[in-house]
Image (cartoon, grey):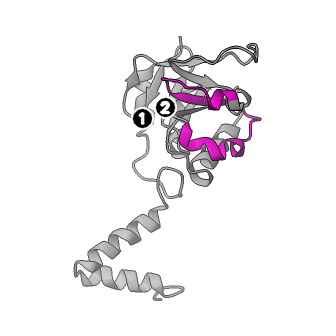
Amino acid sequence: MHSLINKTSVVVADPWLRWDAGADPARAVPEAGDWLFPPAVWLDARVRGATRTGRNGVWLEPGDDPAALAAEVDRLALIAVHFPSFTDGRGFSTARLLRERHGYRGELRATGPLTRDTLFYLARCGFDTFELREGEDPVEALTELSAFDEVYQAAADRGPLFGRRLQDARIRAESGSSAESAMVERARVPGGAR
């Protein structure tokens, strides 16, 4: 069985059930339970309009276009993005698109043969939970999420380092520090002070 972790702990029980992609299209939509549907099933009006007591989610394969869900992101509690192999990185782009372009704020889960050395980068792209490959120690994998103290580049999880430092300097400048005021002023001038 695959282990499931979030950014802070091991998830003991996963409440989500997966709708079989090959199931009969006329199959009744379950009224209860938290279900993950393939995009084609979710986008079917009879599924979206069904009266359900459980939460709804969608799982995406690498070839699925996240833009198809753009109008639906507020109705989904979970979007799972499948990585079919270690070398297939399309899910990283899918996560960034869902978070940054389509404004998805719910749980974003990475699934597939994930190894602990990719977790930090998956989190930077916006993933919240991670389904680890068989045999991967979830407690050890959690340590990878804090592998780096600081990052320079902007990503789904935070802005660029210079922007965060400039924001801190602005806050200090507003409180009256002259050194920070000079730093903020240099940042306003193209090319800064030489």
Quadrant of residue 8 within the rendered picture: top left
Determine whether label 1 and label 2 are within 8 Å by CB. Answer: yes
Considering only vertical position in the picture, is 150 above or below 16? Answer: below
Q: Is residue 62 left or right of residue 48?
A: right
Residue at the spot x=40%, y=72% of the render?
Answer: 166
Give percent across and percent down for residue 82.
65, 29
Q: Which residue is mark 1?
A: 7
Q: Residue furthest top?
A: 1
Work out whether residue 182 can be spotted.
yes
Callout 1 amino acid: Lys
Q: Considering only order in the chain, which callout, 2 or 1, is on the residue closer to the N terminus?
A: 1
Q: Give the magenta range.
A: 46-75
Give percent across and percent down for residue 122.
55, 39
Q: Which residue is mark 2?
A: 129
Examine the structure image and report whether residue 171 is included in the region drawn in magenta. Answer: no
Total label count?
Answer: 2
